[in-house]
Amino acid sequence: MNLGIIGQAVGLFAVTNIDDILILALFFGQSAGHRGSTRQIVIGQYLGFAAILAVAIAAAFGATFLPESAIPYLGLLPLALGLKAAWQAWKNHRDGGDDEEADAREGGPSPLEVAAITFANGGDNIGVYVPVFATAGVDGMSVYAVVFLVLVAIWCCAGRFFATRPVIAKALSRWGHILLPLVLITIGLLILI
């Protein structure tokens, strides 16, 4: 195994996924104290990233599932989820703020919500990965894919780590219900634009 390719894969993943740490920290902060939420977030992150890899690998082999003109419309996913989260936060605030029953129902994002946001936010990743995969060949592409999948776990751990630091956890518990919709709406709008 070529250490140069591994190093390039680590660098490429880090550069194209730095924003995911913030999103993951927000997800982990939102779901703090909810049983099974970590597993749901990790599963969702893997599903979304596996979809990104599948599309990038297929495109590297010459098959494109989405026309380039359709990629900006992926921004509708995080935009819709951000608006939904904003509506829920506003509704909870309007109804008295500390509704423990609503908190127990919510329990953080579902795996499909995390996967949708990961995939939508990964449109730029696909554009970067395709030419790299196309020139790396099958063996190189396999190394990239394995390294990326290992790094998804590390990214999830980093997101959870940041969400559980006392200062960050306190900020997320106080402002997370506002930050998550704001970040999702911003990502959605940036992808659309």
Image (cartoon, grey):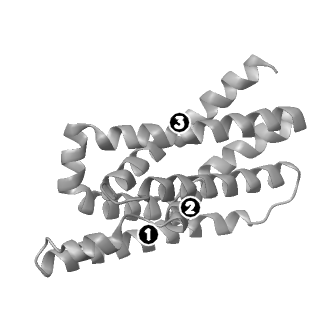
Residue drawn at point x = 64 percent, y = 64 percent: 71
For the residues bearing labels 1 and 3, Cβ distance under 8 angstroms: no
Between disc 1 and disc 3, whose residue precedes?
A: 1
Q: Residue furthest top?
A: 3
Q: Relative to 173, is 14 above or below?
A: above
Which quarter of the picture shows residue 95?
bottom left
**Which residue bears the numbered disc 2?**
115
Q: Which residue position is annotated with label 3?
A: 154
Q: Residues within 10 Å of mark 1 (few under 14, many from 20)?
A: many
Is residue 10 or residue 161 the one in the foreground? Answer: 161
Which residue is drawn at the image coordinates 81% and 37% (left, top)?
142
Q: Which residue is mark 1?
A: 79
Work out whether mark 3 precedes mark 2 in sequence or the reverse, and give the earlier one.
2
> Which residue type does callout 3 highlight?
Ile
Q: Residue at x 30, y 41 (%)?
A: 164
Contact between labelled residues 2 and 3, with CB atoms less than 8 Å apart: no
Relative to residue 64, is residue 77 depicted above or below? below
Position of residue 160 measured from the top left corner of the image (x, y, whole percent): 39, 43
The tag on residue 121 is none
Q: Amino acid at mark 1?
A: Leu
Real-space CA distance between mark 3 and mark 2, rounded to the nearest whole angstrom? 17 Å
Residue 89 x %, y %: 24, 72
Answer above or below: position of 192 versus 18.
below
- Gap in Å between the C-alphas at discs 1 and 3? 26 Å
Which element carries disc 2, helix, strand or loop? helix
| 93 lies left or right of 35 | left
